[in-house]
Amino acid sequence: MTGSEIRRLTTEIQAELSELAKVEAVLDEADAQYNERTPDFLELSGIALNLHAFYSGAENLFRRIALELGEGLPSGGGWHSQLLRNMALEIPQLRPRVITPETRSKLGEYLRFRHLVRHAYGHELGWERIRGLLDNLGAAYAGFVEDVGEFLHFLEAVAEE
């Protein structure tokens, strides 16, 4: 990749992080609002949709990195899980890991939930599971942002070469 292509990629990553910050803010508000009461079905559906958006945004970023840096996307039925695992791997002479194994583990819960949202009926979404995801979102989001920030430093260094 050329320096200008890497700068474009870093700009796209930063834009995705900006969008994810908005989703995280909505979910943080939901976490506070529903700490004392259980949301009704429509409120629960809205929270679930934003939890779905959180992981989808992270995966969009991972897809962009994999495609732009030339490693390609995994194939087959488990490609979403494989992509997440790949992002926690250093690929020699291509890139360092994008996220830590700890962040990968945390994001795995949101990947599984996103799958549930896509393939289940709305009435199957349980508040207990969503409450747990909201409780853990701060740590998952902070780890993700920190890890991607370190990866951006790598890209910026490569662009300067």
Image (spheres, rainbow, N blue to C red):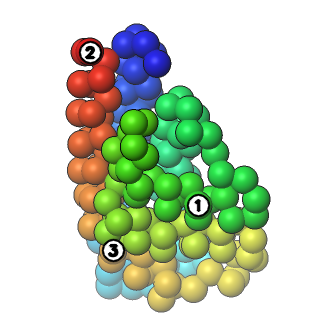
Chain-order first, disc 1 or disc 2:
1
Residues under labels 1 and 2: Cα distance? Answer: 31 Å
Residue 76 in sight: yes
Give the amino acid type for the residue marked by disc 3 in the picture: Asn
Q: Which residue is mark 1?
A: 82
Horizontal arrangement in the rendering, residue 31 relative to residue 77 (left or right) = left
Which SS class for mark 2?
A: loop
Rendered-image quadrant of the C terminus? top left
- Residue 120 image position (x, y, % from top left): 74, 76
Residues under labels 1 and 3: Cα distance? Answer: 22 Å
Residue closer to the observer: 101 or 10: 101
Chain-order first, disc 3 or disc 2:
3
Q: Which residue is mark 3?
A: 136
Q: Quadrant location of residue 139?
A: bottom left
Give the amino acid type for the residue marked by disc 2 in the picture: Glu
Chain-order first, disc 1 or disc 3:
1
Outermost residue to the bottom: 128
Q: Residue at x 53, y 50 (%)?
A: 59
Residue 31 in sight: no
Residue closer to the observer: 71 or 104: 71
In front of the other: label 1 or label 2? 2
Which SS class for mark 3?
A: helix
Q: Which residue is mark 2?
A: 161
Q: Are marks 1 and 3 in contact (CB under 8 Å)?
A: no
